[in-house]
Image: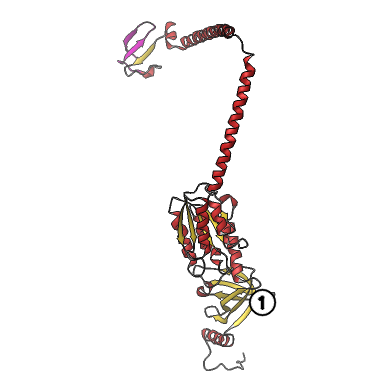
Amino acid sequence: MQPSLLAPPARALSVSELVRRIRDVLEDELREVWVVGEISNVRRPASGHCYFSLKDRQSQIASVMFRSAVQSLKFRPEDGLEVIVRGRISLYDVRGDLQLYADWMEPRGLGSQQLALEQLKRKLAAEGLFAPERKRPLPPWPRAVGLVTALTGAAVQDMLAVLRSRWPSVRVVVSPVRVQGKGAAPEICAALAALSDLPEVDVVIVGRGGGSIEDLWVFNEERVARAIAASRAPVVSAVGHEIDFTVADLVADRRAPTPTAAAAMVVPNAQELRERAVALEAALQAGVTRRLQRLRERVLAGEGRLKDPRHVLEMMRQRLDEIGERASAAIERRLRWTRERLQSTEQRLAALSPLAVLERGYSIVRREDGAVVRRSADVAAGDTLDVLLAEGRLRARVEDE
């Protein structure tokens, strides 16, 4: 065997050293790359990291986005989604695997915010939160109306004005919140929960006036949607103007195009009710008058057709006599049938009676403990027996078995 023509160096690299050198070269040359591809094989372990493959028609690369970066995403990575990713290329030391370490991701074509909204809608719809059958009717006569809105702005003043003008006796409980910006969502959720704890609040309006899509975005957040769904009292969503539509509108029991319309929706109009009551009273009076007039005409028309009361009484007496005779006959038939049934039953019972057997010369023998003696083996010599006859009974002693 010929010796190798290549002489090994004085010191060869270990595998770990080789991997680290490759990693250093990659990280130095490709410390920031932008890659477009399709996501596949998404995995989300309990650690909160997101593992996936980024691929095109010819190649793919293993990728990972750590928890801190995942938490900043506005959408949820899904298989089949085309994205643009920013990250760095390196090696996973343990296996020597080439990986893309992503720190930013954005969907291609559809903005991340809009994609997150569509994903949330699909999720809540699958849970049944948009289903018509879970929508509750609004109470016709609410004792108190809860308002979840900002104290500043025209919306709250418009709603208060409408509520007071339509139904002055209604109590209004305002739970002031921020309706846009950071911190608005938890305030809205807390206000809805607080109003649910007030048993006198029969309906809740949550909303605000118009604004840009960014201003209204808090009403597209999942926790706000779930807080509306969890409300004990029915919720009317009144977010923005008529053209605006949010997730809160889909989850709420009713949607109003504006806050003013929401206020008009939850309470009746006292003035309209008064006018309706006056109209109903007038219609009732007219109906009673017409009814009395028809009855008066019927009485007058029937006066000529009245018969002599004495003749009517005679016919009634005769009718009573006939009914009495038929009733007596029916009772007599029923009694006769019952007597025959009783006699037949007595005969059957007599035939089955043990006493009838005794009349034919048989007897019933019992031991002192009351047990009936059926075989000679049931007794022993010296046992005392009780013998029941058709007439009377005997005491006997067994002399021999």
In which quadrant of the rendered view does residue 101 lie? Answer: bottom right
Quadrant of the snapshot with the N terminus: bottom right
Compared with 141, 281 (above or below) is above
Which residue is at 49% across, 11% downward?
Answer: 345
Nearest to the observer: residue 169 or residue 194: 169
Circle 1 sits in a helix, a strand or a loop, which is it? loop
Q: Residues within 10 Å of mark 1 (few under 14, many from 20)?
A: few
Q: What amino acid is at disc 1?
A: Ser
Q: Position of residue 297 (x, y in %)?
A: 63, 22
Is residue 210 shown in magenta? no
Q: Quadrant of residue 316?
A: top right
Q: Which residue is tagged 1?
A: 59
In magenta segment, residue 399: yes
Q: What is the magenta range?
A: 379-401
Q: Point out residue 267 in the picture as x, y percentages from the top left corner.
A: 53, 50
Q: Name the spot of residue 142 as percent of width and height, x first.
A: 49, 49
In the shown orientation, is residue 391 left or right of residue 246? left
Q: Position of residue 111 (x, y in %)?
A: 62, 71
Residue 152 appearing in the image? yes
Tell me the quarter of the image containing the C terminus: top left
Please state which of residues 123 and 168 is positioned toward the viewer in this rendering: 168
Residue depicted at x 58% and y 94% = 7
Q: Is residue 304 above or below residue 265?
A: above
| Residue 8 drawn above or below residue 303 | below
Is the image coloured rainbow, by chain, by secondary structure, or in one colour? secondary structure
Of the pair 113 and 46, the residue shown nearer to us: 113
| Closer-to-camera residue (331/67) | 331
